[in-house]
Amino acid sequence: MPEPVWYRSLYWRFALGFVALLAALLVVQGLVFLWMTGRMSEFFPSRSPAQFANSMAGEVATAVRDQPDLDLNEFVTKNYSRAFWAFVIAMRDTRYAFSQRVPPSRDLLPAAGQRLGVDFFRMSGPGRGGGNPNWTPPPRPGGGRGGDAGGRGADASGGRGADQFARPDRGGRGFRTDGRGPQSPLEYAYVRVDNVDVGLVVVSAEPPPISVALRNLGPTLAVVALGLLVTGTAVAALLVFRPANRRLRMLQQAANAVGAGTSGVRAEESGGDEVSSLARAFNEMAGRLEERTSALETADRARRQLLADVSHELTTPLAAIRGYVETLGMDNLVLDEPTRARYLQIVTEETERLEHIVGDLLDLAKLDGGGGAFKVESVSIPQLFERVQRRHEPVVQRKRIELRTRVAPDVQSVTGDPNRIEQALQNLVANAARHTPEGGHIDVHADRVPDGVRLSVEDSGPGIPPEHLSRVFERFYKVDVSRAGTALPSGSGLGLSIVQAIVNRHGGTVTASNMPGGGARFEIVLPA
């Protein structure tokens, strides 16, 4: 069975699929990172707090010049709702507004009031700070994110506002001085309209808390991660696991069909991975099962045929024996001595025939089952041929048949069981003598062939009809009715079957054919 191709192996396919999927996820994550980089600039802006303060001061100055009663809260909501710096815009007329996304600390408004010389805590009225000394910045208004106008406004007019309308704090950077906690760096930028400082922008120099970034980017990152997970799982299932699962299901269906008794079912062997190897092994197993099933069916048919043939062959002599014995046992039937002797001779012959059939059946059973005594030794071929001649001398003399033997000089012995080899050769010579007419001849030869040693028996009889050649070694198969010149009674039909069983057990072959000049030829080839 061929080994799976390494690059088609399931292990490598899973590994390469995992690497490819990981690479694809890294590429997608890189693209998402590039997209998120633009978003992160909102949380970690490239401008410093001082630049942001100056840009915002310029924007506020431009807006106040165009609209003196500007609503600072609305202005912040419209332009700076997405800013991630904590800031406060304070005007000399006590108007102020705070950053919305990042709540400012409590020190921004007092710091602005200290720079402007305005006490925002003692003022009252709409839009002003109250007199509560425990004032805290108002909570972040609803709506939250707003549009992108804040960033664009700060970028578009930051330079112009800072140059024309904003006067940066001469000190540049300040700290909390109220004594209520640790000092924090603050950036200041004055709002200047017509060369007059009308307000102040105070920006905390501390970076925005990471919780704010996570709160705003967390949902987006979670959705992207979940989408990548689902997409990666789907791609892996479709490209890596689905083909293997499909072929495994087909293999399961084929196994179920074979288990249900359906023949000719085969699994798909495409691919070079472990599944295809399993499919090939399954197909080989299914083929062997079908061969064994076919062999069992053939053996069962042969067994049934053998039982029928045995019953038929045994019935004939038993019926003859029973008929003549009943005739001889009749009290009112008077038989002369010659007739009685002839009846007894027939009973004796039929008994011997019955005994011969039973003996042949026992021999076949032993040979087919591998039982019985079987020894391997060197058998002298000249001595073997001499015993065959002595055994058949009475028959050949009575029929005036010439039995000739010839042994090639380079073949003097053969290896095998001497008794079984002689039995096979005796059966072939007896079969030839039975079908050779008077005055004919039988030739027994031994010579060497490339496959081993060949023992051949040729007769001068009428030969075997071509349609019967393929069946002469079947049990109880006879062609006597088709062959003329028979002077001896027919055999049991098991002699040639025994010859074939003996030769097969020696690892050789036996064949039957007709010679061009007439007569049959049987050849036994035994391994050297």
Image (cartoon, rainbow, N blue to C red):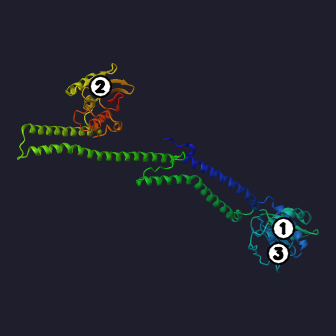
- Checking the image for residue 201, the label placed there is 1
Q: Secondary structure at mark 2?
A: strand
Q: Does dot 3 land on a helix, a strand or a loop? A: loop
Kindly report which numbered mark, 3 or 1, lies closer to the viewer in this rendering.
1
**Mark 2, residues whose alpha carbon is within 10 Å: few (<14), some, or many (≥20)?**
many
Q: Mark 1 or mark 3, which is nearer the start of the sequence?
A: 3
Q: Quadrant of the C terminus?
A: top left
Front residue of 63/394: it is 394
Say whether residue 132 is left or right of residue 481: right
Residue 232 vs 501, above or below: the answer is below
Is the C-beta separation of discs 1 and 2 under 8 Å? no
Label 1 neighbourhood size at 10 Å, few (<14), some (14-19), many (20+)? many
Q: Which of the marked residues, 2 or 3, is nearer the chain's N terminus?
A: 3
What is the three-letter code of the residue carrying label 2?
A: Val
Query: What residue lies at 31% left-to-right and 37% top-to-bottom?
Result: 473
The alpha-carbon separation of the residues under discs 3 and 1 comes to: 15 Å
Residue 154 visible in image:
yes
Q: Which residue is at the front of the view, 190 or 5?
A: 5
Kindly identify which residue carries mark 2.
444
Which amino acid, mark 1?
Val
The residue under label 3 is: 120
Residue 318: image location, x then y, percent? 17, 44
**Viewed as shown, does residue 75 lie left or right of 337?**
right
Seen from this angle, which residue lies furthest top? 409
Q: Position of residue 464 (x, y in %)?
A: 32, 34
Q: Position of residue 183 (x, y in %)?
A: 77, 64
Q: Nearer the viewer, mark 2 or mark 3?
A: 2
> In the figure, is residue 394 to the left or right of 146?
left
